[in-house]
Image: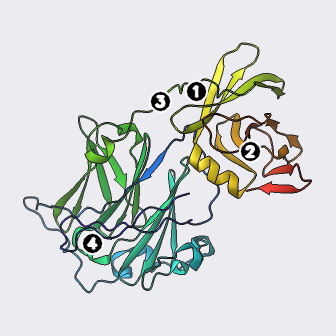
Amino acid sequence: MTRLPQLEQELVAAAGRLPRRAVVPVARAAVATAVVIAAITAGVVVSDGGGRSPAGGTAPAAFGTDATLPDMLAVFRRPATPADDPDLTPADIPDRRPGEDPARARRIDWPDATIFLWPWRDGVCQSFDPKRVQASGTGCPPLDVLRRTGVAVGLMTREASAFASGVAVDGVDEVVLKPDGGRDVRLPVRDNTFVANLGPFAGEGARLEWTYAGEERSFDLTPILTELPAPTPHPDPVAGSISPPLEFTADGKRYSAIGFHTGRTAVCTRLSDRDTHSPLGYSCLNERLLGDALRRQPALLFAGGDTEQAGFARADVTKLTAGDAEVALSEPWRPEPWPGEPIRFFYVFAGARMPLTAALADGRTVEVP
């Protein structure tokens, strides 16, 4: 996982761009799954509004300069529970801000993400862990931004995937995603947070809009979205990178699978019905993320559907099991231009019990996180 830079670029502040936050591990969450994963880039900005007052009507005033975090965010006025613990240690945050205290975090679960909020002396930190995307990020907008604009917007991007997440003060009940030429998507604010999956709008223009203190505010997403490449529906294998086929039977059905390199820094597996030769899908992972993961652990389960889940393992993994079920594990191969040691791919089918256990060539048995 990677850590996002700080959520603090103020577009009109005299201080200008602030230094980026260090890249370190975030909360030790379960590995997210995704069908296609490729190179990751991370960028975060904070909207400073540019608001205009709507005609007529009254609205609550903006929070004053003395408003504290609990004054502005109701989520911090509820008691903390054990589920709110993000499991962070001081070593996880070498660039900890003054007064930054993840022990006082609050957890918010969304269908597409898990968010943790915790205070620092002059602001709030947000840890954003999108589900089905193997990355997570943290940023720390100052209270002054929230007092003036009502919303701090953070962005996470990777190839054709992008998410916007945000912190919103009390009184901002929704944020509206407005794609160019498309239908508005109304994003509810829950526990002072919101989440938007921007992937469907890759290559298009869009903006976020909200109302704060009687003024309409907006933030332009177009520069981010137009830099995202369109999804690649069928990655092409690099010549010489294809593994020997793995043929196996699961739940009475016969399957064939191969591993390969796309030449776009991703290592993939593709599963087919062995009897009809019809493809059943493919799963890809960025080679850098894969290499980092296999240096930490012997195997990585990274993609899954309703029927099967796919993963990669080091060559010294001789057997994988899930409960009483043996996992279909390929022979070692090198997916050129893969720079590391030979690897294996594997499949786990529905009905198998987790977690995975890896038997290693040196005789050790390791549980796969």
The mark lying in front, picked from 2 and 4, is 2
Task: Tell me where residue 249 appears, x and y as whole percent.
Answer: 83, 26
Disc 1 from disc 2: Cα separation? 20 Å
Q: Amino acid at mark 3?
A: Thr
> Residue at the spot x=33%, y=49% of the render?
186
Q: Mark on residue 238?
A: 1
- Residue linked to disc 3: 232
Q: CA distance from mark 2 to mark 4?
A: 45 Å
Circle 1 Cα neighbour tier, 10 Å, few/some/many (<14 / 14–19 / ≥20): some
Q: Which residue is mark 2?
A: 313
Is label 2 or label 3 in front? 2
Disc 3 to disc 1, C-alpha distance: 15 Å
Let me know if residue 320 appears in the view: no
Answer above or below: position of 118 versus 344. below
| Residue type, mark 4 in image | Val
**Residue ID for mark 4:** 145
Mark 3 or 4: in front is 3
Q: Residue at x 58, y 66 (%)?
A: 27
Of circles 3 and 1, which is in front? 1
Could you say which quadrant of the image residue 120 lies in? bottom left
Q: Earlier in the sequence, mark 1 or mark 2?
A: 1
Q: CA distance from mark 4 to mark 1?
A: 48 Å
> Could you tell me residue 131's position as x and y percent?
54, 51
Image-quadrant location for residue 150: bottom left
Instruction: Look at the picture and state if 149 lies above or below 68.
Output: above
Binning the other alpha carbons within 10 Å of mark 3 as few (below 14), some (14 to 19) or many (20 upward) gives few
- 240 or 147, nearer to the observer: 240
Residues at marks 3 and 4 touching, judged by CB atoms closer than 8 Å? no
| Residue type indicated by callout 2 | Ala
